[in-house]
Image: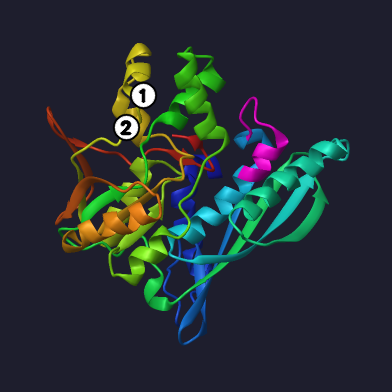
Amino acid sequence: MKTGELGERNFLKTIEHMVAVPEGAKLRFDDDASDFPLSENQNIIVNVDTFVGTTDWLPGMTDAQVGRKTAVMALSDIAAKGGSPLAAMLSLCVPHDYDVIATQELIRGFSQYCMKKAIPFLGGDLGASNDVILTGVAVGVAPPKGIISRGGAKKGDVIAVTGDFGLTSAAYEILLKGEKAEDSFKRRAITAAYKPEIPIGLISALAEKDAVTSSMDSSDGLGITLNTMATQSNLSFVVETLPVAEGVIYFSRNLYINERRMVFEGGEEFILVVTVPSEKWDEAVEIAGNLHVPLKEIGYTTSGKGVVFESSEGYIEVPPNGYDNFREWE
């Protein structure tokens, strides 16, 4: 069997026995990042993410934007686990004939995003390959109690997100399939795909007040994220409000694409999905507001399995579809 036939998530199950989980670690295998204890009161959190030119480089992206996005990819999972980022590094491989200025721009984009977030960029490694490959490494710290896994949701929690979905799905339709869109919407969609943002500091602030039970970065798609969190929490997630970005419904209906597919089955959005104890919801909204991060309620957790969307047509199953590194888009 080939990896593309098996798929990334099924492949991970075959190697779980090869991966160590240190004593005192809060995160299990196949969470967003990995951790291990430094002391009784502090764990280190490490994440690695790779950008591959032939599969990840969107038409029109500059070299600096590629470097920037790699930094976002590496840092996002630290933020999602409640870590305070300490530093980042970059491994960069380019072909022998790649332009020197373009190579510098890849590094500059990574470095400048770290600088913007006051995170030291410590350098890294250079190599040669047949493709442009950037691997970002991010390191952070958190108290053990402040590390938030994918699977800690409790029955009756509020499900919330830090943004609206569908813009990057639209950008892929525009950039890869040549679909048309109004200029203002096209600019917003492409900016979301080229220059994603992440809310560093939110999860750690919520964790300090016991106002978050689970958290996950949505870069593989909202449907995959919700299903993963529901499965690992042994609960059912019910979505009552579709977190759809302005203009996405109009754009999708013009293409005869169901807007639910644009929202649930996209990816590369880096919006955080969290569960919050219902009695802590008002406090969580206040904390997010103080950090200038939107926190929007979209549903609730309950007993059962799977993820459903509560629509006017009844309950509709939300499948775990999105981006798979071995299959690309499912």
Q: Identify the residue shown where x is 41% and y is 65%.
A: 204
Callout 1 touching callout 2 (CB < 8 Å): yes
Q: Residue furthest front?
A: 290
Amino acid type at mark 2? Val
Q: Position of residue 183 (x, y in %)?
A: 49, 15
| Image-based side of 155 in relation to 14, left or right | left
The residue labelled by disc 1 is 248
Q: Quadrant of residue 164?
A: top left
Side of 129 relative to 137 (left or right): right
Q: In the image shown, does 174 or 84 lie closer to the viewer?
A: 84
Check disc 2 and report the residue beneath it.
244
Nearer to me, 23 or 143 = 143
Q: What residue type is labelled 1?
A: Val
Magenta residues (range): 57-68
Q: In which quarter of the image is the C terminus?
A: top left
Q: Position of residue 39 (x, y in %)?
A: 51, 86
Outermost bottom residue: 40
